[in-house]
Image (cartoon, grey):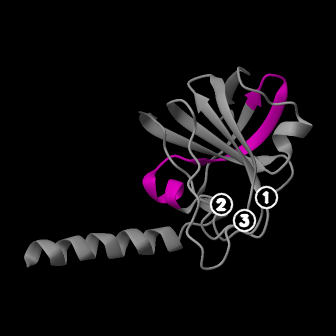
Amino acid sequence: MYVIFFCLIIVFFFIIKIFFINEKNYEIVDIKIDNTMIRSQLADNSAKRFKGLSGRESLEKDMGMLFIFDGYGKFPFVMRNMKFSIDIIWIRDNFVVDISKNLALPVLGAPLIEYAPLADINRVLEVGAGFTDSNNVKIGDTFQIIKPKT
């Protein structure tokens, strides 16, 4: 009984934490994919990774969200509460290993579609739909995080 109550309290605080995350809570980093530069918000903990771009009205043209994982895997992504289409760039260490383009918005009442890479990854970059085509991003491209100078 106490275990269930304790678990419910932990879940409650996790959900509250997610609702209070906004765009100002993310560190901004510059990313270079081959010769293309993009600014990105960093989703580097479980609450930020869960929330992702959900609920936002749009994403600036040269802005993305970078998800950092502690290990390697085929982490599935869904378009939960998304209001715009995106491309997902799947990254292992310093190389693009897969790309999912122009992902469709969720249909109200339909089950969410899970998107996952073909290979194990440890990073994901979400960008606006069409970014990968307009910037010629392709599998095998190099990837680099450029931290801002402090």
Q: Which residue is mark 1?
A: 59
Position of 113 with respect to 105 (left or right) is left
Q: Which mark is residue 105?
A: 3
Rendered position, 127 above or below 120: below
Counting residues from the start of the chain, the first of labels 1 and 3 encountered is 1
Q: Quadrant of the C terminus?
A: top right
Element carrying mark 3 = loop
Counting residues from the start of the chain, the first of labels 2 and 3 encountered is 2
How many residues crowd mark 3 within 10 Å: few (<14), some (14–19), many (20+)? Answer: some
- Asked whether 98 or 44 is in front, the reply is 98
Q: Residue at coordinates 59% horizontally, 66% vertically from top-left?
A: 80
Q: CA distance from mark 1 to mark 2?
A: 8 Å
Q: Which mark is residue 53?
A: 2
| Residues rendered magenta in the picture | 32-50
Q: What amino acid type should be assigned to the residue bearing mark 1?
A: Leu
Position of 88 with respect to 7 (left or right) is right
Rendered position, 1 above or below 103: below
Q: Quadrant of residue 84?
A: bottom right
How many residues crowd mark 1 within 10 Å: few (<14), some (14–19), many (20+)? Answer: some
Residue 25 image position (x, y, % from top left): 59, 59
Residue 128 image position (x, y, % from top left): 80, 51
Residue sitting at the far left:
1
